[in-house]
Amino acid sequence: MAQQVQHCALVVSDVLLYRDSVAAGLGRSNHFGPVRVADACDVLSVVAGCEAEVVFLDMSRPASLALSRRIGACIDGAPIIGFGVASHDEALACAEAGISAFVGAEGTIEDLCQAALLALEGEAVISPRLAAMLVRRVAALSCAHALPSAALTRREQEIACLIDHGLSNKEIAGTLRISPATVKNHVHVILEKLNVTRRNAIGRSLEAAASMAVPVAALSSRT
């Protein structure tokens, strides 16, 4: 019988109970070994010495997103699996930070193992709601890059694109992780800059701006 392949893993958390419990559970799964542990203070030195194939990072701590970026710069493409993610907004932030997969606060060791094994194969499992949020976020970023930047700031362009996709102020706030009041202020400024009075007119203004950008670029290339 062929021996099951085990992957060297690192569990990172400042909470000793979480760290040791997750490490013990992963070790019992027979998919991971050896399983090393580290906290935020010593994780970079541990990463440098253990050649981890996958990192499990406790996302319940305030500085976890910043820490994930530091770890990512040191592990040469190995996936980072976030655990203890409390909401879809937090999961979206994890994705933007480069975390390969994430498991909610109600997740089990089995969920962690499945997420990690899929990530090691270049795949990920996400909920339909989170997938929709990621698509909207990508659409907003794409639109912000494509539109002329003279009239609207980059943030205003993102919000204008999300409005054009039919999102409410509350949904935009969740997607961009800002407050509804901030979204409302941005919408007011966008309406003024585009010289329109209704939200449903924003999309037409964006289309007109985009169509004007092509001839301008063509004229510039001829001079």
Image (cartoon, rainbow, N blue to C red):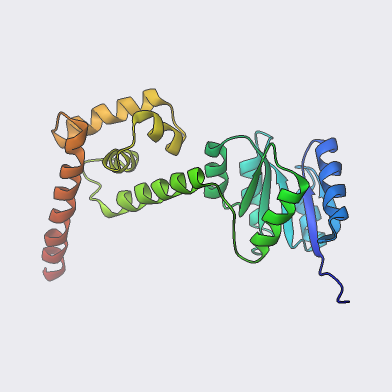
Screen quadrant of the C terminus: bottom left
Q: Is residue 104 above or below residue 191?
A: below
Q: Residue at x 64, y 55 (%)?
A: 72
Image quarter for residue 181?
top left
Is residue 80 rendered to the left or right of residue 170? right
* Number of numbered discs on residues: 0
- In the image, 25 versus 197, the foreground residue is 25
> Which residue appears farthest toward the front when viewing the image?
1
> Which residue appears farthest toward the top when viewing the image?
181
Q: Is residue 205 above or below residue 76?
A: above
- In the image, 186 versus 34, the foreground residue is 34
Screen quadrant of the N terminus: bottom right
Is residue 212 rendered to the left or right of residue 184? left
Q: Residue at x 32, y 25 (%)?
A: 184
Q: Residue at x 79, y 54 (%)?
A: 10
x, y percentage for residue 69? 61, 50
Q: Residue at x 40, y 33 (%)?
A: 171
x, y percentage for residue 76? 66, 64
Q: Is residue 119 above or below residue 166?
A: below
Residue 78 appears in the picture as rendered = no
- In the image, 2 versus 56, the foreground residue is 2
Image quarter for residue 216?
bottom left
Image quarter for residue 122?
bottom right
Is residue 126 rendered to the left or right of residue 24? left
